[in-house]
Amino acid sequence: MYPLHITNNEYFFGDVKLLDIAKSFGTPTYVYDLDIVGEQYDSIKKSFDWPKLRICYAMKANSNIDILKFLKSKGSSIDAVSYGDILVALKAGFTPEDIIYTTNNASDEEIELVVKSNVLINIGDLSRLEKFGQKHPESKVCLRINTEVESGENDLVKTAGKESQFGILLEDVDAAKNIIEKYHLNIIGIHEHTGSGLYDTDDMFESINRTLNVAKKFENLEFVDFGGGFKVPYKPDEHTIDYNKFGKKLIEIFDKFCKDYGKTLELLFEPGKYMVAQSGILLVEVNTIRKTPHKNYAGVNSGFSQLIRPLLYGAYHHIVNCNNPNGIKTKYDIAGNICEGGDLFAKERMIEEIREGDILIIQNAGAYCYSMASVYNNRPLPGEIIIIKNKVKISTERLSFEKYVHKYFD
Ligand code: LLP
């Protein structure tokens, strides 16, 4: 689950010694191992044995250009959610046909930019459908359905349900059809995305069946897109999903649907977290040990501005001491360098004894970590290192403080 290993008392990621990276490139530094991204991509391909399978990587999880280029070389497509995403994906070598753009309250200007770039739009609300139809009658469109199944690893990452802001509700499908007919829109895809970190396969199949029930009402479909949400275990004892078993059942259902529909449709998924979470770590350095009668704090040179998931979602990220793999486990709060009481990467966590100067490894940091980072407290973003076939390369230079403050003074 955590693809790190210890050899001769040293932590390695693939064949690369992590302390060497910390020494050469400094900290805080994100490190991604592309071989792991490749394994995840291949495992989805293997789980869903369908002649027309398309994996659209949800680049919101991590839009590092080297990861994108690598996934392009593997045959991946892209799930984009902004015009900026489209520009970055094109820069990485994807073609407009490789990309599906899902609108999230996008402005009219943004929609026009997407249309000009010849990328297919996935529309999930009646208002946008109407405006799009008026402006671009007879266009090809994908329709995002809200299957009203609420699921996801926490409330903030659920994207369906009657009260959600995403997707056409089942009760509004007829209204959507009226708009579609009025403007002769050509619905070539039906899409759903329930949430992130989906752990209940009954929910998932309920949502899949409801999507297919809607899909059969449209005659010109080329694909059905079941979104992302593949689960990644974050805690050492967290249960995983057997995607081979899940895939077999899904293919049986989809095969029957396609036979009834009279056409072998493309089957699309949009995994983000599953593709990259485990491929990444964040290396941070401990600069302050604070022992009080109540707490042991280890203060580090990064904070929630650079990895916000623990604060925002209460997410667990496994942390180990790179300098002391076999140290005696002691209880710590791992605090960041942001001036807020909530800036903790871990609370009351048993970690090998920590000394000032030690490097900690924050794991499963490949998805929604760098991509959600900010420069809050005027702390420049960390660098990004790529490991590919056990070779190390700088992907993004750490933004030096001098470079960062220039934006105010140049
Ligand atoms: N497709 C759509 C339409 C989405 O909204 C999302 C994620 C995905 C695909 C990819 O979902 P994934 O496979 O990564 O679960 N920042 C949160 C996750 C937010 C997901 C938002 N939508 C986190 O760190 O847990």
Image: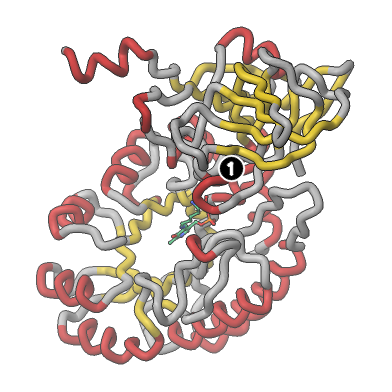
In the picture shown, does residue 189 fall above or below 325? below
Q: Tell me the residue at 31%/13% (across/down).
A: 403
Q: Tell me the residue at 70%/56% (across/down).
A: 46
Quadrant showing the N terminus: top right
Q: Position of residue 89 (x, y in %)?
A: 37, 41
Q: Identify the image quadrant of residue 408.
A: top left
Badge 1 is on which residue? 276
In the picture shown, does residue 127 fall above or below 348? below
Q: Tell me the residue at 72%/62% (across/down).
A: 243
* Residue 141 seen in the figure: yes
Dot 1 falls on a residue whose secondary structure is: helix
Q: Nearer the viewer, residue 258 or 289?
A: 289
Q: Nearer the viewer, residue 276 or 294?
A: 294
* Residue 255 seen in the figure: no
Q: Identify the image quadrant of residue 12.
A: top right
> Which residue ends up furthest to the left in the rendered image?
135
Q: Is residue 64 left or right of residue 279?
A: left
Which amino acid is tagged 1? Val
Q: Is residue 307 left or right of residue 319?
A: left
Q: Tell me the residue at 43%/71% (across/down).
A: 191
Q: Position of residue 323 (x, y in %)?
A: 76, 17
In the picture shown, does residue 274 fall above or below 229? above
Q: Nearer the viewer, residue 82 or 45?
A: 82
Q: Is residue 27 left or right of residue 90?
A: right
Q: Is residue 346 left or right of residue 69?
A: right
